């Protein structure tokens, strides 16, 4: 079944190019996309946030992709889908523009516009994984991260089940350069938390990722 979804998704791109499932472009990037204000519910439904900063002052960017369920918006279409396209485009452009750069300390000029992503697939549903429309949307919108692969020195993808791994493999043609820099781990935190802590400061992670901070971020980025 999943192989069929992959085939249909790739066939869709081959025939239609990088359009949305209804044949219209959505979320066209403008010079003001970084300042665009998304609908109030998006940061909760499609969360990402800065957990802290690594030893080189690079932002640790947690993206809870398992919660990013675009299916209701894809079914309804209209303004909600256009807004979601803009929201993901804004996220991608923020990675590329250095939006997450730490303000330099008054006594230091050491800072970086790179990010260390932690992509977390915890909570992803079978409906998301087996939806052709959702797959096409992810390949199209998140695939644009590839143009900013130089902003990502390394990163982690965690809570990846066997089926989710197939989904990730299917995304590689669109995110190949980014994924080459990412370490991919399964659903056992006892396996991947030690690997995170070898490269990231414990006091810059919440407890879900082996850190000492509150497990719930104060607020997702808006």
Image (spheres, rainbow, N blue to C red):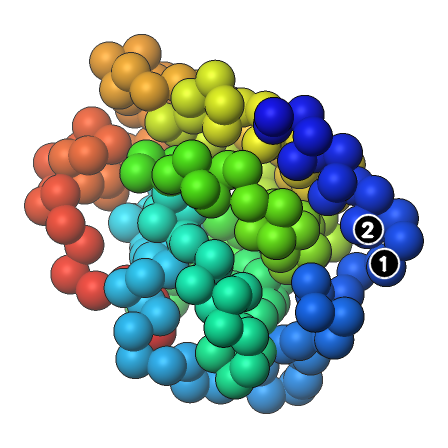
The location of residue 34, given as percent across then percent down, is 53, 79
The location of residue 17, given as percent across then percent down, is 85, 58
User: Is residue 104 at all visible to an observer of this figure?
Assistant: no
Numbered disc 2: secondary structure: helix
Q: CA distance from mark 2 to mark 1?
A: 5 Å
Q: Are marks 2 and 1 in contact (CB under 8 Å)?
A: yes
Classify mark 2: residues with Cα within 10 Å, few (<14), some (14-19) or many (20+): some
Q: Is residue 220 left or right of residue 215?
A: right
Q: Is residue 141 left or right of residue 64?
A: right
Q: Residue at x 57, y 70 (%)?
A: 85
The location of residue 208, given as percent across then percent down, is 19, 34
Indicate the quadrant containing the N terminus: top left, top right, bottom left or bottom right. top right
User: Where does label 2 land, which residue?
Assistant: 13
User: Is residue 78 at all visible to an observer of this figure?
Assistant: yes
Q: Residue at x 74, y 54 (%)?
A: 147
Indicate the quadrant containing the C terminus: top left, top right, bottom left or bottom right. bottom left
Q: Residue at x 28, y 49 (%)?
A: 51
- Along the viewing direction, whichever of 3 and 206 lies nearer the viewer: 3
User: Where does label 1 land, which residue?
Assistant: 17
Q: Residue at x 29, y 16 (%)?
A: 188
Q: Is residue 76 left or right of residue 102?
A: right
The location of residue 182, given as percent across then percent down, is 55, 29
In the depicted structure, whether residue 196 falls above or below residue 64: above
Any mark on residue 130, and which?
A: none
- Along the viewing direction, whichever of 7 and 90 lies nearer the viewer: 7
């Amino acid at each position: 079944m999943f192989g069929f979804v992959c085939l249909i998704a790739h066939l869709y791109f081959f025939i239609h190019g990088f359009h949305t499932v209804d044949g219209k472009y959505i979320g066209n990037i403008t010079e003001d996309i970084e300042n665009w204000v998304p609908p109030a519910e998006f940061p909760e439904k499609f969360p990402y946030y800065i957990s802290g900063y690594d030893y080189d002052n690079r932002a640790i960017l947690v993206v809870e992709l398992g919660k990013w369920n675009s299916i209701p918006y894809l079914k309804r279409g209209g303004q909600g889908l256009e807004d979601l396209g803009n929201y993901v485009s804004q996220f991608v452009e923020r990675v590329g523009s250095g939006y997450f750069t730490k303000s330099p300390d008054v006594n230091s000029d050491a800072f970086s516009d790179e990010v260390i992503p932690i992509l977390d697939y915890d909570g992803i549903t079978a409906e998301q994984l087996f939806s052709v429309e959702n797959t096409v949307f992810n390949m199209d919108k998140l695939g644009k991260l590839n143009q900013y692969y130089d902003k990502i020195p390394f990163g982690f993808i965690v809570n990846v089940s066997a089926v989710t791994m197939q989904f990730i493999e299917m995304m590689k043609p669109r995110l190949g350069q980014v994924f080459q820099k990412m370490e991919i781990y399964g659903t056992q935190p006892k396996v991947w938390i030690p690997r995170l802590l070898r490269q990231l400061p414990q006091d810059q992670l919440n407890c879900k990722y082996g850190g000492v901070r509150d497990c719930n971020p104060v607020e997702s980025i808006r």
